[in-house]
Amino acid sequence: MDKLIIRGGTPLQGEIRISGAKNAVLPILSGALLADSPVVISNVPHLNDVTTTMELLGRMGVNLVIDEKLNIEIDSNTIQSFRAPYELVKTMRASILVLGPLLARFGKADVSLPGGCAIGTRPVDLHIKGLQAMGANIVVEDGYIKASAKRLHGARIIMETVTVTGTENLLMAATLADGQTVIENAAREPEVTDLVNFLIKMGANINGVGTDTLVIEGKEKLDGTRYRVLPDRIETGTYLVAGAITAGHVKLKDTDAKLLDSVLQKLRDAGADITTGEDWIELNMHGRRPQAVDVKTAPYPAFPTDMQAQFTALNAIANGAGSVTETVFENRFMHVQEMQRMGARVRVEGRTAYSQGIPRLTGAQVMATDLRASASLILAGLAADGETIVDRIYHIDRGYEAIEEKLRQLGASIQRKPN
């Protein structure tokens, strides 16, 4: 198991390219199961979760070809198995996204209950209830969701809570259902919209793009297509915070500022000078220490839960007192006690982390507990005196492509070593 060794204290400077969005490419790869001819996906990030999804599809018999530009061609006409086994699904919740496409196109699916980061309860009952409303026969036994249907039919589905993967699963299933499906209280995240645009390019009939009500007219079949995944807004936000927490000056290319309105506003509140173009964002702290900010997470377009750990790190070294309130997941402050080991004056009360910023953290050995916590500890290490060692970084490789290489491009002292 690898670890990252960071020597902090250097203001980050320079330019890097942002990768394709992890949370968009995973449902799109699953959505390729709906097409009756090959699909080619570009701007695919090289991540462990992508590799796991490809292994899952390959185990089912799906034909996958990767070219020299890392475009992935997916042909599901060779599929032989409709089972997503526990040994793959346990590492990644997004594996459940094959459930809707398999059921809609092939009439059967046998999918293990998912795993992933330990950041709270994320039940799949909304996926199951929605598919049952569309006519699926589903039993949960031996740790597997076992589903079948001759052909799904349209239904009106009101999501009890906003769920990204739930919206995506039901949306994909509805594209091949008989009749009209309406999904109300649907998630509006850009990654959901990217999936919608991908499905439309395959011939799906979907209205309400980008809103909380999606109306899908089912088709008999969907066609193959070529599609480029949108930029990763969370990776973008993480590197912007890296620039801010080190009082640096960074420019991020191949990204989209429109996906990050709430994050950019909080960075401006923290004292960052931010300029944007069509496909780039530049942040300049002019050598200044950030100001503490108050953040509250909520579903898009509000502040994203996947950025709260990074802003907890920012507040730890900011000037003044700040707070980060988490409303999406109930168990997402496990990084705080690791930051406390580095001297951070942060306390958690209920769902809020209150910070009193100090000028510098102190390097320490810390342990990552989930994907975004990993990123926050790396950011804390960049802003700490001395050496920080981040253990259990397999989490970071699930969601950040070559993070140490990109940080080194910006001048950071960071190395990956085996334990």
Image: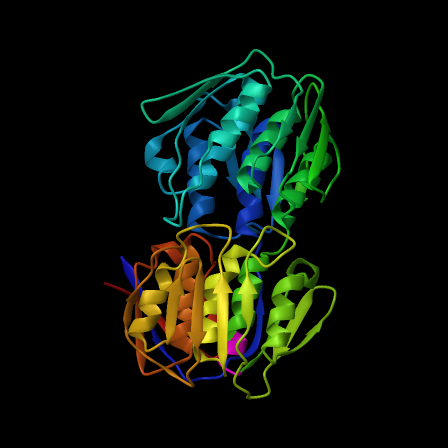
| Magenta segment, prevailing SS (helix, strand or loop) | helix
Q: Where residue 409 sits in the image (x, y, percent)?
A: 50, 74
- The segment highlighted magenta reads 243-247
Residue 410 visible in rendering: no
Q: Nearer the viewer, residue 54 or 49?
A: 49
Picture quadrant where residue 15 is located: bottom right
Side of 336 where 302 appears, left or right: right
Q: Where residue 213 sits in the image (x, y, percent)?
A: 71, 36
Residue 299 visible in rendering: yes
Question: Number of numbered discs present?
Answer: 0
In this view, 2 is above or below 34: below
Picture quadrant where residue 351 is located: bottom left
Q: Residue at x 63, y 48 (%)?
A: 189
Q: Residue at x 52, y 52 (%)?
A: 45
In this picture the colour scheme is: rainbow
Dividing the image into 4 quarters, which one contains the C terminus? bottom left
Q: Nearer the viewer, residue 15 or 116?
A: 116
In this view, 300 is above or below 162: below
Q: Nearer the viewer, residue 64 or 176?
A: 176
